[in-house]
Every structure is written in C-alpha cells, then in structure tokens.
Amino acid sequence: MSAFSETAAAGRLAALDALLEGVDRERAILAALEDEAPVVRDRAIRLATRYIEPQVLGELVADETNATLRNAAITALERQGPYAVPHLESMLARPEEDVVMFALQMLARIGEPSVVRTVAPLVRHSNPNIAQSAVEALGQLRSAQAVPTLLDLLHGDLWLQLAAIEALGEIGDPAAVPPLVALVPDSIVAEPAVAALQRIAAPESLEALIDRLVSVRERSLRDGLLLAIGVVIDLHPNPGPVAIQYSGRLELDPSRDLLGYLEEILQWDPGLAAPDAGGEPRDGDSLLRAATALTVVAGLRSMYPPVLIRIATDESATWAVTLFRRNPGELSPALRQLLRHHDLRVRRGALLAGSFQAEDLPLVLEHLEDADWLIRAAACRALGVIGNPDTVPLLVHRLREGVEVERAAAVDALAEFPAESLGALEPCLGPDAAEPVQAAALEVLGKRKMQRFDAQKMERFEARIIELARHPSPEVRGPAIRAAAQLPGSRAEVALIRALADRHEPIQVEALELLVKRDHGKTVSTLAALLGADDSLRYHVIRALGHLRAAEAAPKLESLYGECGPYEQVEIVLALIRIAAPGVAQFLRTRLSESEPEIRRVAARGLATLADRTQLPLLLALAADSDWCVRDEAARGLGLLGMAECREPLLILARDVEPVVASTARAALVLLRTVAPAAA
Amino acid sequence: MTPVEAADWKLLTDLIQARFGLMFDGVRCEILEGRLRPRLRALHLDSLREYYLYLRFHPERELEFGRLASLVTNNETYFFRETHQFDILVRHVLPPLKPSLRERPFKILCAGCSSGEEAYSMVIAFQNAGLELAGITWEIDAHDVDPVRVARGRDAVYEPTSLRACDADVRRKYFTPSGGRYQLKERHRKGVRFFETNLAAPNGALGWAVFDAILCRNMLIYFGAPAFDNLIGLFARSLRPGGYLLLGHSESLLDRQTPFVPVSFEGGVVYRKGMDAA
C-alpha cells in the first residue's frame, strides 16, 4: 500500500539522482517524467528544466499520444523561461494546431515582452483556434503595442471579439475605453466589455459607466457596471464632479428603480449567506463597497442611512468612513438632518463619518450628553475632528467618567489635540485617579511630543509620568513608558533604560523600541553595554543595534558571535549586514563555511546585498551551491551587480531545478536589461 | 511587514508542510499571510523570513508552533454537516459488526476534528438511531493539531455559527443557551474523547487495528503528496481489517495505490480496508 509505494518511489527518486552525473542522465529524466508517483514526476520536471534542451522537450509537446509526458514537458519548458523562448517561437511555425496553441500559451506564461512581434501576426491565422490563442497570449503579455491590433478585432468573429475584449482588459490601456464602452449595453459582449473596463479602471470611463448603469435593467450587467464603477472611483483622483451630475436624476426618478437596487446592496448582510450554497454567488462585499462608493461620491442623500448604519454597527467598515472623509461633498450639508434622524445608528454613523467644521460644534455637543453611550463615544470622536481646544475638558471628563468605549474614544480624540492644550489631563495622572483613567491619560500623552508645555507644567507632568513608569501594574507602566518616550531630557531616557529590565517582557521590548526610535545619541552605547547580559532581551538588543545601523557596535557583535546559540547568531549576522561596517564581507565569507544552513543562507543574503564588482567570483561560486536558498541569493546578487558577465550565469540559474531560484534569476535578468542594456 | 519574497514563502511553507503536512499555494498563501501578520506584529518581527527563523531557532519555538497550528488549519465546520455519512455508518458499517459490538464499543476516529462539531453530531446521530437502546456503546476519538480548538471541543460551548444548520427546535433539543453561545447538553457528549495530535508528524501512531471507521473529511485536500500518503498509511494501520475510511466529498483515493477499495453506499463513496490487509 502507500507504505510500500512510498518506499518504491523513494527508491526511484534515489536512482534518478544517482544517474544525474552519468551518460544516461537524459534518458533517466525522460523516463521519470512519466513515473506513476507524483513526487518522482515533480523531481523529473525540475531536472528536465535544468538539463533537457528545449528542442527535446518540444518534441514531447508534439506527442499527442502521451498526455503525461506532454504536460510534464510543457511545465519544464515554461520553467526554462527565456532559455526556451527561441525554440518556442520556432514552434509557432509547426503545422500541428495543438502544438502552436501550446507554444502560444507557454510564451504568454513566460512573459518575455519581445515575443509580441512573433505572436501578433497570428491573430489573423486562418485557424480560428490559433488566432484566439494568439489574442489571449497578447493579453497575458500585457503589451500596449498590441492594442491597435486587438481593437481591430472588436467587430469581427464573436470568439475573437470576446478574446480581444478580455485581452484589452488585461493590457489596461485607456485607449480601449471608448470602443469598449460602445459595446455596452446592447451587445451580447456587454458583460465581458464591462469586466474589461473594470480591469482598465481608467478615470475617463467613470461618466460612461454611470451613464450605462442608469440605463440598464439586467441584474448581472448592473452588478458588473457597479463593480467597475467602484474600482474606477477608488482609483479616480477626483470622482465627485463627474458622479454628482447624476445625483438629481437618480434621486428624482419616480420609479426608484436604481435606488432600490442600490439600497438592497447597501443592506447586504454577509452573515446571511447560506452555508454550502450552490450556484454562482454574487460578490456581496465588493458590490457593497461599490454601492457605498457611488452613494458617497454622487451624494445620494436618500441612501446615506444604510451606509451610516453600517458604519455605526460594523467595526470593520472604516473604509466607508474613509470614503466620506475623502469625499465630504454632500454629507456635510446633510449632517444637521442626519444628526436628528430617528434611528440612533444613523446618528452614530453620521458622528463617526462627518468631516465636522468649527461651526458644527454646538450640534456635536448636544450628542455628548446623549443617553446612549455609543452616541456619546461617537460625539467624542467628532470633537477630535473639530479640534477646538475649549472642548478638551469635556473630553477629559468623558475619559474619567465614561464607560470603556467612551474612554477609548476620548483617548483617540484627545490625541488629535496639540500637547499644550492637554493640561486638563493632569488630574487623571494623580494618585487618586483609577488605574484605567491613569492608563488612558498616559496613552494620550504617549501620542504627542510634550516639549511645548510651559516649564512648570512640564516638570509636574514629567515627574508624574516617570513615577507611573514604576507603577505595580503593567497596564499603567506600559503607557507610562510610551508617554516618557515623548518627554525631552535625560530623566525620561533613564526611565526607558530602566524599563529594559522590567519584569514584564513585552514592556522590555517596547522600551527598547522606543529608545531606538528616540535615539538621543547615547542609545547605542547603552544597548552595547547590554550585550554582556545573557538574557532573553539580548536578542532584541542585537536587532535594535542592527536597526540603528550602529557601526561602533559591530566589533562587539562580531566578538559575541562565538558565544551565542544559533538564534542570536542569525540575528548578529543580520544586524551586521544592516550595519554594513567595513570588513563585514570577510565575516560573512567565514560564515559560509559553517555547517548550519540558515547561517550560510543569511551570510549569502548579506554578500548578495552588499556585493560590489570584486565579489563577482564569489557570487558565481554561490550560484553553483547545493543549497537552493544560497543559489537564490546569488541570483539576486548577480542582478543587483548589473554586469554583462552576470547574464550567462543568470541564464543557467533561470533554468534551476528549484522554481523559486529560476524565478529570481528571471527577475534579475529583467533588472539586468534595465540597468545595463548593453549587458543584456 | 516587508513584501514577501518567494524564497521566504518557500522556506516557511516547506517548514509548515514538514511539520503539519499542509500545503500552501496561491490564494491559500494570501490567506495565511493575512493570518500571520498579527503574529509578526506581536513578536516584533518585520518579515516572514524572520518568522521562519524564529520557528527554527527561538527557545520558545514549540509554543509558537502551537499557535501556528491554529493559523494554518481550516477550522470551518458546523453541527450536522454532511450527515449522510453518519447514516452510512449506522445503516451499512455498523450492522455487520453487531455481534462483536455486544462485547466492545464501536470505535471511530474523527481526524481533524476541529472543535468537535462533527464528533458530537455523530453522537447525536447514533442516539437518534437507537444504538443505546440496542445496547451498543461507542468511543469516538477526536484528534486535532490545534490546542485551542481541542480545548473548545472539550468545553463543548459553541458560537451561533457552529449551529448554522440547526433550526430553533434543534437548538432547543440539543443545546442550552449560555451568554450568546450554546452549551451542548451533557448526554450528547457521551463517548467522545479529544486528543491534541499532529497526525502528520513522522512516525505518528494511533494504535494497530483499533478503529472500525475513520472520518477524515476536508482535511486531505490541504495535504502535500508525502503527507497524504503517510496519513493514508497511518489510517490503514489503525483500522481493523474490513474497516472503513470516510473522506470529504471533494477528496478521493481513486487514483492512488492504497489498500482501500471504494464502496458505494446510498450514492456516496467510502473506502474499505481489505480483510487480509495488514
């Protein structure tokens, strides 16, 4: 059973590997390409990619009697990438229809842009299947050069027309917008044309898409148009002026046909989707986002309530708030009415989404005393948007007296105010304040630099914050060190350094990160001193020194290397690569002779990243390493070097038995073309 | 988090495959990336490569593998899902065993049990089929790699989504509401034992010829070829001769060389171990 079939497969794998160095290599690989065990076939495909010439593989593609070999050969040819391209191009002239079609598909998937000139003429091939495959290939190659040819096909044979539409969508050239719009709504290719317009997502298509949405009735076409509109709005620099033209027309339509359609989508509930439902499901979430985008940018006021209800009830709907903030246009004039809406969810949504101005303050303040705490919390957030310093005491009151949600909202709102207006927070830090209030006040202070307090107030705040950094509860100490990090001066620095020895590890790590961010000059020496302590923090210290690019710590890190376990050793190597101190290349070369593969891999990564022209021989050696990860780094490094001598070894790596290496090598070859055309 | 490099993905997914047998590619990689992001933030790591190195070397890596188990497994399940397989157990698998079941329990393995919905649904199916009245007892060994899910299974308290296929009557009959969730009634937990087990671990053992049937539904589709073969081998060893393996509707052994033969019951295909197979 599987136990013995596994053993047999393992034996065949071993036999295959044993033949790799001998004269029977090609025969063994070709035989293994049709092995019954997938694991052996997979290995053989990798080896064929590396060792079998495209001509040989091409003949296997032509053998229609053996589908297993044909599929394996196709995979291997695709993985050979640029190396196989000349032969695949020559296959386009073969008489067998299926061979030409396979060649087109492989060329498309390899994605070498230069093949467009060979592929494009085939769109006029007398065999319609070949012509269609050529059109599809041009789409996958995403060549703008092919757009005129494809546009010509929009009025011909239906199948070519469909393929051309899809290809134009994949290419994404805005030149295709007017001809594609002309195919909507009366043509039978309307839905694919809309899908293509969605992929192109050109701003200039917005008006035409809304125009068509208003006029069509068919549900699936409407869905397609709405989805396209959603994407175009998302990418449009200023969709409002275009969309707003349709507001009156839609709102005044007595049939409310389109508004009814939008309303149904805006009320979509993902929780009601039936399990294991059959059929083609509508993309509810994307339609919801598109309908919301259209509602917001076109200012469809009658549709605001369902949008605001979602904002009020679905924490993940922050994207809808962002839409309103980006396009405040019609919401602002409607706010007064919406804040008096009978449904408190609408009121809450309006408070959360509104871009309130100074003159809206009285309206918002009314809601700060609402009976519902969710409304009060939303009002706090709206006060943060207005940013009137006179409201700070009111927010501080909510922070002290409110329920948890109000407190969190007050914290976020107060964080919007400049530090100098936050003096009213002082009582919240006092010994009589409850711990959650102290923590909340510290959270606010942790989000703002505090240099601008007057000297006396600063001294009081500083003393109290530093005191709270030693509070028994980590719930207070954590925000206290964040607040301390915002204070100028050495006392705060000392508080952070002391927190490096906190008994709560997350606080230690956060203190370290705050010190790194703050970096007042002494951080590196402080951290370097901590390298002597063999504790769990040392790993983070090593990382921090790397992030600080602390060249002065490099010798100490190097000398520490021999005393550490592999976990810290890897971090030391990574830190030294970041620091890039002189002499690091030699250190990394030494690491290549270690037995631990991960150390070799990070060393290779460093050498590839830091390589200069003198390192070419080393990179060439790494390109032949037995570890795929090291070869992958070599491929990356050769691409970065950008020298003409890198092309040949990269072409070999582009056929590597490990697809990841081949893919990196192909990307490096593209880079080589970009940085050194002469080399390519 | 820095953009994910293909090599980083390969290192991490190879490690996951070696550890859990699970394969990740395409959309599943994207889903996994989304699930891993909060873990990386919590561990103050910048990239998947750093996370990989953490799993390889960190002193607390075993703890992290436990957390990773929750992230890599698909815990999508609910009560009374694909109940026709329980009918097959009751109507076709169990009757020939009745003479021996007077002296021993009907033994089922529920592989990849998640939080126990399937195992408990089976108990309810057995009770509704009158097995208790017929004097037949059962033991259902429910195994999963995710310690959190296994703990939930032991607690038998469920979110409403786990009861999505239950109408109000069914909910009332088998569950007690408990703070917005549902506690399975004690009598429907009878005979179920939970185990935190990595079935894909090398040299995994469940006992020799122990089970009358194994349910492993919608788990093998995520397994790479070696892990798939290992697991089928493990199942074959732990089933009694003539025992049955029940897979999910999208899973099949038809194109593989195994000691199982397909058997069709009521339009569904299950797999039977040969009477003379080891």
Image (cartoon, coloured by chain):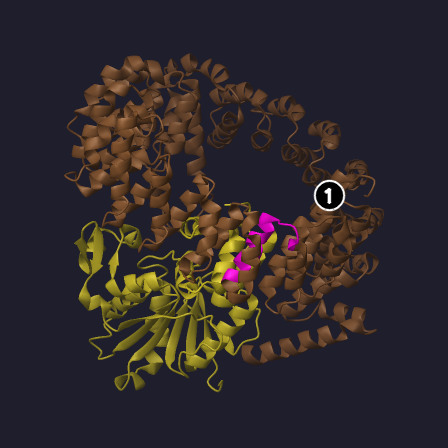
Chain colours: A brown, B yellow
Q: Is residue A312 visible?
A: yes
Determine the main secondary structure of the stretch shown in magenta.
helix
The residue nearer to you, when weighing A431 against A302, is: A431
Image coordinates for residue A14, horizontal then vertical, percent? 68, 76
Image coordinates for residue A520, horizontal then vertical, percent? 45, 39
What range is drawn magenta here? A568-584
Image coordinates for residue A470, horizontal then vertical, percent? 26, 47
Is residue B92 within the magenta segment? no
Q: Is residue A530 above or below residue A66?
A: above
**Left or right of A264 on screen, residue A18:** right
Displayed quadrant of residue A171: top right
The residue nearer to you, when weighing A146 against B9, is: B9
Q: Is residue A260 above or below residue A569?
A: above
Q: At 37% across and 39% down in the image, what residue appears?
A: A490
In which quadrant of the rendered image does the C terminus of chain A lie? top right
**Amino acid type, callout 1:** Val
Q: At 78% across and 63% down in the image, what residue appears?
A: A51
Callout 1 environment at 10 Å: few (<14), some (14 to 19), or many (20+)?
A: some
Q: List the residue tagged with mark 1.
A: A670
Which chain does the numbered disc 1 sit on?
A: A
Displayed quadrant of residue A398: top left
Is residue A572 within the magenta segment? yes
- Number of marks in the image? 1
Q: Is residue A78 above or below residue B248?
A: above
Q: At 36% across and 57% down in the image, what residue appears?
A: B77
Image coordinates for residue A173, horizontal then vertical, percent? 66, 28
**Left or right of A410 on screen, residue A294:** right
Secondary element at tag 1: helix
In which quadrant of the rendered image does the N terminus of chain A lie? bottom right
Q: Is residue A665 visible?
A: no
